[in-house]
Image (tube, coloured by chain):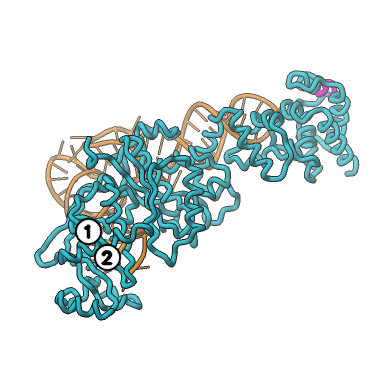
RNA sequence: GGCGCUAUCGUCUAGGGGUUAGGACGGAAGAUUCUCAAUCUUCAAACCCGGGUUCGAUUCCCGGUAGCGCUACCA
């Protein structure tokens, strides 16, 4: 294989904010394609917009990328390659394919009802001698591409997703290559780098589809063969609008998913299903299976909605239900050891003191009851808090019962549990026998105990819970509950 | 306004000239059960509109409509 035919893709975020979920998906698709074809992934920070770039944003993007745990091979910063961009722009100018525009950038917005702006005639037609003279005199100018509009020319390219694309050159404005401060524009910098870094496939958001005609023009002017293009349908909010932090809040940031307790594999799986499918009804797809099924041709063309609720009542509602469901599937699939480790980190970060062995016992009891890792804090709190938060004593009263029955049950439980064998089977035997002795249904027996030890009616199975909690805590909490029913 | 792209259940999607239009999430009901989950079963739920082409269009073509994108010396 010759060097020229090697597959090389790039992910080129501009550091003007956190890692956006749409950017993350673009990165994932690039990764998938590279992995699938044995290609190389280039990470390029497109940081030519000096005013908007922040170091904080660079950190946040790397944070998100590290969490996804997908690798890349080469790394560049556009801001360190400005000489290359200018050199290539200059070469295009020398060929007569670009010209200097001395008219200062448009201040307000133009009136679009009169059609699009295409170029300043007097600037496009300025003689080279005059142009050189004004430039030498120090007059600022932007360098504009001279879009071929003399004869009816159509610019064409084939998109791996959207198919044959064509646009008349007469509909393309003479876009800028260099700003008047000498900085390259996005179009110039991007194409120059794509050429220099020998990018073979550009996989990016569909918002660049119409820009691609300009890019084809630049590639040709620079004497380079345009790479292959694949544009991805956009990810949009439930209202159909492009996802934006200002409008939709933290749901558009990758780190929000991380912090809420998504597993990166689940998040990746979810994102892949937005605009792509393996076409065989599979949805729970570990990464290696996605790699095997992935192809650019299977990508959809319509935008996909991330279905989160705008004013989210619960943290869970803030996310697309399918993402949450997939996450629960990945949690179920995780070995208990591994899940336990991850949950422990969250519990400890929340300020609770808990040892590994105990977390390892708790994990199987809650793994089917949590959808996000952080749910451990609400689903298993009673295992690691010393004092149960106050609960409504009325919850202690079982179905078809009253306070007197609750008291009777709890006192009996107290008596039985003082000497019961604290294992699943031992507890079941003692408690069922106690229920029978009292002449109450098992449910009527278990409910007051459950509430007494967990503070709520919905909790993991009782015998396992008591076994993990231990005799001491169990009895103390039952005593407390007995006092509560008495005081009513 | 110009140009480009898109259109199947609420959402993500499969399919494709003749189908009971398939799956998943979510919703509803039921089974199971010590509660809650998990799991299983069942149900409701869609081809944007109008013309053509055709024996037959949801599928192909054209038009409309709607949505999105680009239209910066932002990326």
The quarter of the rendered structure image containing the C terminus of chain A is top right
Q: Which label's residue is closer to the chain start, 1 or 2?
A: 2
Residue A136 location in percent, x, y?
Answer: 24, 78
Q: Secondary structure at mark 1?
A: helix
Q: Using the numbered discs, state the Cα–Cα distance from disc 1 to disc 2 in whole angstroms.
A: 9 Å
Mark 2, Cα crowd under 10 Å, few <14 / some 14-19 / many 20+, is many
Horizontally, residue A387 falls left or right of residue A302, namely: right
Q: Main secondary structure of the magenta part?
A: helix
In the rendered image, which quarter is residue B20 located in?
Answer: top left
Mark 1, Cα crowd under 10 Å, few <14 / some 14-19 / many 20+, is many
Q: Is residue A1 magenta?
A: no
- Chain identifier, cyan in the render: A
Residue topped by disc 2: A177
Q: Please tell me which residue is depicted at 32% across the width and 35% down the height of the picture.
A: A38
Give the colour in which the image draws chain B: orange
In the rendered image, which quarter is residue A274 located in?
Answer: top left
Do the residues bearing badges 1 and 2 touch, measured as CB atoms within 8 Å? yes
Of the pair A237 and A363, the residue shown nearer to us: A363
The quarter of the rendered structure image containing the N terminus of chain A is top left
């Amino acid at each position: 294989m010759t060097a020229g035919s090697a597959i090389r893709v790039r992910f080129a975020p501009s550091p003007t904010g956190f890692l956006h979920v749409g950017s993350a998906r673009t990165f994932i698709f690039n990764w998938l394609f590279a992995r699938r074809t044995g290609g190389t992934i280039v990470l390029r920070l497109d940081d030519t917009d000096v005013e908007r770039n922040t170091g904080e944003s660079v950190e946040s993007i790397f944070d998100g990328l590290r969490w996804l745990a997908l690798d890349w091979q080469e790394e560049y910063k556009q801001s360190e390659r400005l000489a290359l961009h200018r050199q290539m722009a200059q070469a295009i100018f020398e060929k007569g394919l670009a010209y200097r525009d001395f008219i200062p950038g448009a201040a307000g917005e133009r009136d679009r009802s009169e059609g699009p702006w295409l170029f300043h005639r007097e600037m496009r037609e300025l003689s080279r001698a005059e142009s050189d003279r004004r430039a030498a005199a120090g007059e600022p100018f932007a360098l504009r591409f001279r879009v071929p509009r003399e004869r009816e020319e159509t610019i064409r390219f084939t998109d791996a997703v959207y198919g044959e694309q064509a646009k008349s050159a007469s509909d393309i404005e003479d876009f800028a290559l260099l700003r008047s401060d000498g900085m390259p524009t996005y179009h110039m910098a991007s194409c120059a780098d794509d050429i220099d870094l020998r990018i073979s496939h550009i996989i990016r958001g569909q918002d660049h589809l119409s820009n691609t005609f300009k890019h084809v023009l630049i590639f040709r002017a620079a004497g380079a063969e345009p790479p292959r293009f694949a544009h991805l349908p956009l990810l949009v909010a439930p209202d159909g609008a492009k996802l934006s932090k200002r409008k939709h809040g933290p749901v558009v940031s990758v780190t929000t998913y991380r912090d809420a307790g998504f597993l990166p594999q689940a998040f990746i799986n979810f994102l892949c299903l937005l605009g792509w499918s393996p076409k065989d009804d599979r949805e729970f797809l570990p990464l290696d299976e996605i790699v095997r099924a992935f192809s650019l041709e299977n990508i959809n063309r319509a935008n996909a909605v991330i279905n989160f609720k705008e004013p989210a009542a619960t943290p869970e509602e803030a996310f697309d239900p399918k993402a949450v469901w997939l996450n629960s599937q990945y949690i179920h699939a995780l070995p208990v050891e591994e899940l336990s480790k991850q949950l422990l980190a969250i519990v400890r970060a929340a300020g609770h003191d808990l040892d590994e062995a105990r977390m390892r016992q708790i994990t199987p009891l809650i793994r089917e009851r949590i959808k996000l890792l952080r749910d451990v804090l609400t689903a298993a709190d009673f295992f690691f808090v010393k004092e149960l938060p106050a609960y409504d004593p009325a919850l202690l009263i079982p179905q078809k019962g009253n306070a007197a029955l609750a008291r009777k049950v709890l006192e009996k439980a107290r008596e039985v549990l003082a000497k019961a064998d604290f294992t699943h089977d031992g507890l079941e035997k003692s408690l069922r026998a106690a229920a029978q002795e009292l002449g109450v249904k098992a449910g009527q027996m278990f409910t007051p105990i459950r509430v007494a030890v967990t503070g709520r009616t919905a909790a993991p199975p009782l015998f396992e819970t008591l076994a993990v909690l231990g005799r001491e805590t169990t009895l103390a909490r039952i005593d407390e509950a007995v006092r509560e029913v008495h005081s009513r």
